[in-house]
Image: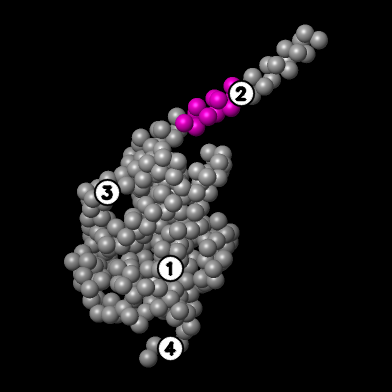
Amino acid sequence: MQCFCNDAIAAPAYHRDASALRMTLALILAAFIAGHAIAIRLGSFLGIFALMALWEALSPRRHRSMTRRARWTGNLGLVIMNSLLLRLILPAAAVGAAAFATAHGWGLLALAHLSAGATVVIAVVALDLTIYFQHVMLHAVPILWRLHRVHHADLDLDVTTGLRFHPFEILLSLLIKLAAIVLLGAPVVSVVIFEVLLNATSMFNHGNVRLPAAADRLLRWLIVTPDMHRVHHSIEEDETNSNFGFNLPWWDRLFGTYRPQPRAGHEAMTLGIRTFRRPRVCAWLPGMLAIPFIGGAAGYTINRRSWGPPA
């Protein structure tokens, strides 16, 4: 009897100790991620960029219309400019907003009282849904489409296109992301995971890489693949207004914006925008910065999803 009682008392104590250990390890991991967010993001960026560039060189999906040097100079110049701008205006903004919100108990997730793991997963998925709707609005609102045209005016598609955005769009995206983080009360860990995933998947799904057809069909149920996203960069407006997802592919299927393949096929399809075809504008840094202020965009609407031969 004495042994039985001791075992009965020891079991709950063991579970309490194990739970406390898991909680301590989770807090240590969260503190490490929060303290090394910049290094984690930079390391993942450089690693994925190098892997995608090598993959593109070994197994390209399409022939380039311009040399890599001509396009990369402008695209990477824009990346450097945007990085410096964000560091100057709002350094560590997303992580800082997450830390502030969780420290004050703000956000919908704080009210739900979920486990730490469930909170992180829900926050990452909710932030991805936010980016999907943001992307749709960039196509739906003419003044926002002016900014987003810089991304779509690239005459080829490769890993650098996934990083090519006008500085004004980058700032707008950051403000939307900050609002979503505070509204959700997203933990710091979830924000770092989301930003690493978004950056990595953007470089992946813009890559000029070839996947076996069977692998592509399977993967596009879990992640946006290069063939799936390439449709979105078609010169045909009804195809441009599809496949808005960057990371998770479910939103396009759920909201009816999914298109499996381009009409002309991936090798023959034309990329870019009809009104921007000159390399001096589409690939030269000063030209890219000027695109939002050139011509009009009032006639471009998300509702243009039917197709007819261009006039």
Q: Residues within 10 Å of mark 1 (few under 14, many from 20)?
A: some
At label 4, the amino acid type is Pro
At label 3, the amino acid type is Leu
Q: Earlier in the sequence, mark 4 or mark 2?
A: 2
Residue 49 in view in this figure? yes
User: How far across and down, in percent of the image, does residue 151 sit?
Assistant: 33, 66
Q: Is residue 24 magenta?
A: yes
Q: Which residues are magenta?
A: 16-27
Q: Residues within 10 Å of mark 3 (few under 14, many from 20)?
A: few
Q: With respect to residue 227, does 304 lie above or below?
A: below
Label annotation for residue 136: 1
Residue extending farthest to the bottom is: 311
User: How far across and down, in percent of the image, does residue 131 sit?
Assistant: 43, 59
Q: Nearer the viewer, mark 4 or mark 1?
A: 1
How far is mark 1 from mark 2, CA to CA?
Answer: 47 Å
The colour scheme used to paint the residues is: one colour
Quadrant (top left, top right, bottom left, bottom right) of the C terminus: bottom left
How far is mark 1 from mark 3, CA to CA?
Answer: 25 Å
Residue at 44 percent across and 81 percent down: it is 304
Label annotation for residue 309: 4
Q: Earlier in the sequence, mark 4 or mark 3?
A: 3
How far is mark 4 from mark 1, CA to CA?
Answer: 24 Å
Q: Earlier in the sequence, mark 1 or mark 3?
A: 3
